[in-house]
Amino acid sequence: MADPVRIGLLGCGTVGRAFADLLDERAEAVEAATGQRPELAGVLTRGEGSFEEILERSDLIVELIGGTDVARDHVLSALRAGRPVVTANKQLLARYGEELFAAARDSGVQLRFEAAVAGAIPIVRVIQESFGVTEIGKVFGIVNGTTNFILSEMASSGAPYEEVLARAQKLGYAEADPTDDVTGADAAAKMAILARLAFHAPVTLDEVVYEGIEQVKPDDLAYAKELDLSLKLLGVAERREGGISVRVFPCFLYSGHPLAPVGGPFNAVMVEAPAITEVTMSGPGAGGIQTASAVLGDVVSILAGEAPLHEVREDLPIVTDFTSSFYLHLEVADRPGVLAKITHVLGENEVSVKSVVQRGIGDEARLVMVIHECLESRFSAAIDEIAQLDELRSAPRSIRVIEEEFV
Ligand SMILES: NC(=O)c1ccc[n+]([C@@H]2O[C@H](COP(=O)([O-])OP(=O)(O)OC[C@H]3O[C@@H](n4cnc5c(N)ncnc54)[C@H](OP(=O)(O)O)[C@@H]3O)[C@@H](O)[C@H]2O)c1
C-alpha cells in the first residue's frame, strides 16, 4: 500500500473545520482518484499546534487562517521548504501573488487557490487550465455574494440599504463587520486574482479601482425596474487599447443579460474570448462546506500532479480612460424647459440620452435617464454642470449600465 499523504492544516475555523470533516469523509474517494490516501498531519490554531512541527511532518500545507501577516509567513515558509500549498486566502494572493508564485516556481511545487475566488465555482481552474492559452478579452461577474444578496433584497422588498444589511447579518450572509464586502474591497481582491490569471500580467489589489453599494437608494431600484434594469455589484477585468483595466462598481443590467437573473448570495463569472465567445459559470460564492470542497479539489489536483506555472507573459499597463453607459437620477423643479436645459448640457458634452422616465411630485419632478455609452470624463463634466443648475433640488445620482444586448 502507498504511503499516505500527510496534510498540515493551518486554521480550523469555518472553512478549516469543514475541510477537516470533508477530508475524513472523502479520504477513500481521494485515494481512488489519486492513488494516495490523505490524512491530517496536524492542525494549527491560535491555541493549538506548532507551525514548525506541523510543517516538518506534512507533505502538503492547507492555509485557512486568512489575513496577510501570519498566513504570508507560513505559506512562504512552506513553499520554500518544498511543500505544495492550497489556500483560500484572496487577500494574500491579491497582495503578494507574485512573491508566492515565484517561491512556488523556485521550489518546483504547486500553489493552488481555487477557493479564493467565487467559492464553489471552479473559475480559477477553468481560466488557468481550460483557457490557459486562450487570449481572454474580458472576465467579469458577480464575485461577492453578500452584496448580491443585499441588492436582490432591496429590489424585491423596496427596503433601504441599512435594513437589508441587518437582515443579511442575521441570516449569516454578511459579517458583523461588513466593510470589506459593501465597499467593494473583497470583490476587488478577487478581480485582481482573476485578472492576473486571465492576462498573465502582474496585477495587485492596489491597481483595482473599486466602488461599493452603500450609496444605493431604494428609489434607484424602483425606477430601474420601470426601465427593465436590475442592479449588481460587478467586477470587470478587460483588455483595452494599450493595456488592461480592472474595476468593481455597481451597475445596472438589462433583463436579457446572463448575469441579470443571478440573485441572492450567488456568484457568477463570465469569460469572453474570440475563440470561446462567452462562457458563464454560477454557483454559491461562500460558505464553509462549499469553500472546503474547492480546497479539497485543489488537494486532489496537486496529488494528481498537474502544475500551473503562473509565469508573467506580458507586462500590460493598467488603463484608466473608460467609456460607460449610465443611469442618471435627477430631482428638479417642475418647470417648463428644465428637461431641455439638461439635455442641452448633456449634448454639449457629447453625451446622448437613450431613455427618460419623468414623474411630477408636488412642485418637483424626478427625471430618470439612461445615457448611451460615452467617455466617463465627458459624463462627469456634464454632471458637474447639471449640478450647478438653479433647477436642481439635490445632487445628481448616477450608476453605470451595461447596454450590451444578449440573445
Ligand atoms: N468563510 C467563508 O465562507 C470563506 C469563503 C471563501 C474564502 N474564505 C477564506 O478562507 C480563509 C479562512 O476563513 P474562515 O471563515 O474559516 O476564518 P475563521 O473562521 O476566522 O477561522 C480562522 C482560523 O485561523 C486561526 N488563526 C487565526 N489567526 C491565527 C494565528 N495567528 N495563528 C494560527 N491560527 C490562527 C483561527 O484560530 P482560532 O480557532 O484559535 O481562532 C481559526 O481556526 C480566509 O482566508 C477566508 O478569506 C472563507
Image (cartoon, helix red, strand yellow):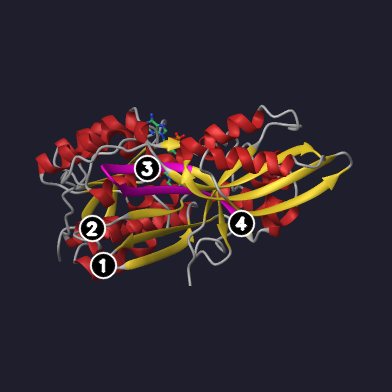
Q: Which residues are magenta?
A: 230-248
Distance from disc 3 to disc 2, alpha carbons, whole Å, reads 17 Å
Residue 240 placement (x, y as % from top left)? 31, 47
Among numbered discs 3 and 2, the one appearing first in the sequence:
2
What residue does disc 1 label? 275
Residue 76 placement (x, y as % from top left)? 22, 34
Q: Nearer the viewer, residue 152 or 309?
A: 152
**Residue at disc 4, secondary structure:** strand
Tell me the residue at 18%/60% (across/down).
133
What residue does disc 4 label? 230
Distance from disc 4 to disc 1, alpha carbons, whole Å, reads 29 Å
Specify the amino acid type for callout 1: Ala
Disc 2, disc 1: CB below 8 Å?
A: yes
216 to 405, vertically: above or below: above
Specify the amino acid type for callout 3: Val
Among numbered discs 2 and 1, the one appearing first in the sequence:
2
Residue 25 placement (x, y as % from top left)? 39, 63
Among numbered discs 4 and 1, the one appearing first in the sequence:
4
Callout 1 environment at 10 Å: few (<14), some (14 to 19), or many (20+)? Answer: few
**Residue at disc 3, secondary structure:** strand
Callout 4 environment at 10 Å: few (<14), some (14 to 19), or many (20+)? Answer: many
Judge whether residue 161 can be spotted in this image.
Answer: no
Callout 2 environment at 10 Å: few (<14), some (14 to 19), or many (20+)? Answer: some
Residue 135 is labelled as 2
Residue 246 is labelled as 3
Magenta stretch: helix, strand or loop mostly: strand
Specify the amino acid type for callout 4: Ser
**Residue at disc 2, secondary structure:** loop
Among numbered discs 3 and 4, the one appearing first in the sequence:
4
**Residue at disc 1, secondary structure:** loop
Which quarter of the image is occupied by the N terminus? bottom left
